[in-house]
Amino acid sequence: MGAQNSVHAGKAKIDANVDFTHKLCATLRLPSLRSTGSPLSLIIGSLCIKHPNLFGGSEKLDVSWDKGLYDSNVIIAFRRPRPEWLSQKCFVIQHSFSPEIGVHGIPIDNFSRSGSGGVNLSRISVGLDRNEPATSDWSSTTSIKFEHVQIVNDSWRSITRDIDGFPLTRSGSPHDNMVVLKQESQYAKANDHSFYQFRMQIEQGIPILSKWLIFNKFKFIATKGVKLGPSFLLASLTGGSIVGDMAPYQAFAIGGLGSVRGYGEGAVGSGRSCLVANSELTFPLNKMLDGAFFLDFGTDLRSACLVPGNPAMRQGKPGSGVGLGYGLRFKSPIGHFMVNHAINDFQQRTVYFGINNLI
C-alpha cells in the first residue's frame, strides 16, 4: 500500500513516503470526486526535507509537500534558535490546492456523498507564527499572514461565478486578498480515568487596503473522554461564527467524516454559524480490534441564508442532520485501519474506510 524512505544528505534529512491507498479505495468502490487520466492522481504521498543548521547558527529549515488524491499542500518554514522560556517564532510560506466540496459540492445519493461542483481553491499565504511558552495546562499560538485566495475550475482556469452564476469571491474578481491575525489557545488536562481539552481559535481580517476582507471569525472545540470499565466514551462539541465581510468559501461546512457521519462533506449545510456534537463509545473485542458505536448531530443555526449566494439553499441542504452507526478499529504494527457504517436522516447508508500511520 505504501513505501517510506529516509535519506541523509550532509546535515539535511529527506523523508519520502508514497502511498497507493487510492488503488485499495477503488477496489472497495469508494466514490471519487472526478475522473482524471493522470497516473499521478493514483498516488498519495509526502516529501519532507529538514536542515537543522542552515547557516551555521542552528537555524532550522523545513520543507514539506503532501499530496492527496485531488489536493496538495506545500509548506516552507524557517526558525531561528531561541531559549525555551521565550516565544518561538517561525517564518512560513504555504501554498495549498484543494477542491471546495464543503460549500459548493453537490450532494448526491440522499446527501450521503458530495460530488464536485467544479470549484477549487488555490491559496498562497506568507507570514509569521509565534508560539508562546506552554504552561502546565495552557498553550497558545499567534500568527499574522497575508493570504491570496484564487478560485479555479477543474481545468485550472480562473473563474468568478459558480454554476448558477453567483459570485465565488467577496471582491467579485477571481481572487481575494486579506491579512489575517489569528490567535489559537488550547487547554488540556488528563488523568488515568479521563481527559478534557478545550481549543479556541479567533481570526481577524485587517483591512490594510479598501478591497481586502475585514471579518472576525471564531471557532471552539470542547472534548471530553471518560473510561467506563474496559470501554471509552468520547464526546465533543464544536461551534463557530463569522461576522463582517465573507466569501462563500469561508462558510462553516457541516457533514462528513469528522463532522456528521452518514452525510457527505458539507451535505448537512453551510452557514455563517454552526454547532456540531459528536459522541463515540469504543470497546475492545480483542488485542488488535475495537468496536465502536457513534451518534453525531450538526446544525447551521439557520444561518445558511446569510452566506453570499446562499449555496446551501440552492443545493437543497437540510441545514441540520443526525448520523448514527457502528464501526471497527483495527490496530496493527504497520498502521491503524478504520471502518465505519453510518446512516443519516434520509435512511441512506454510508461506509467510510480510513488508514492512519501507514508505514
Image (cartoon, grey):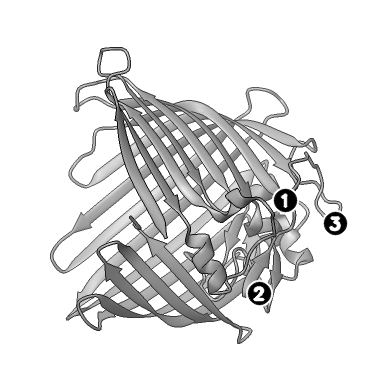
Q: Earlier in the sequence, mark 3 or mark 1?
A: 1
Left or right of 245: which side holds 172? Answer: right
x then y, percent, for residue 299? 57, 68
Looking at the image, is 43 positioned above or below residue 301?
above
Residue 16 in view: yes
Q: Determine which residue is flagged by label 3.
A: 164
Decide which of 208, 175 is in the foreground and name it.
175
Of residues 7 and 348, the one drawn nearer to the viewer in this rendering:
7
Residue 119 - label? 1
| 272 shown above or below 91 | below
Crowd tier of the residue under label 3, counting other residues whose Cα lies within 10 Å: few below 14, some 14–19, many 20 or above: few
Q: Residue at x 75, y 54 (%)?
A: 118
Residue located beneath label 2 in the image: 111
Q: Are marks 2 and 3 in contact (CB under 8 Å)?
A: no
**Residue 289 or 195: which is nearer the viewer?**
289
Question: Could you tell me residue 356's position as x and y percent?
Answer: 37, 60
**Kind of element beneath mark 2:** loop
Q: Nearer the viewer, mark 3 or mark 1?
A: 1
Query: Which residue is at 66% across, 49% downward?
Result: 249
Q: Secondary structure at mark 3?
A: loop
Marks 1 and 2 close (CB-CB < 8 Å): no
Q: Disc 1 and disc 2: Cα gap in Å?
A: 19 Å
Labels 2 and 3: the sequence-earlier one: 2
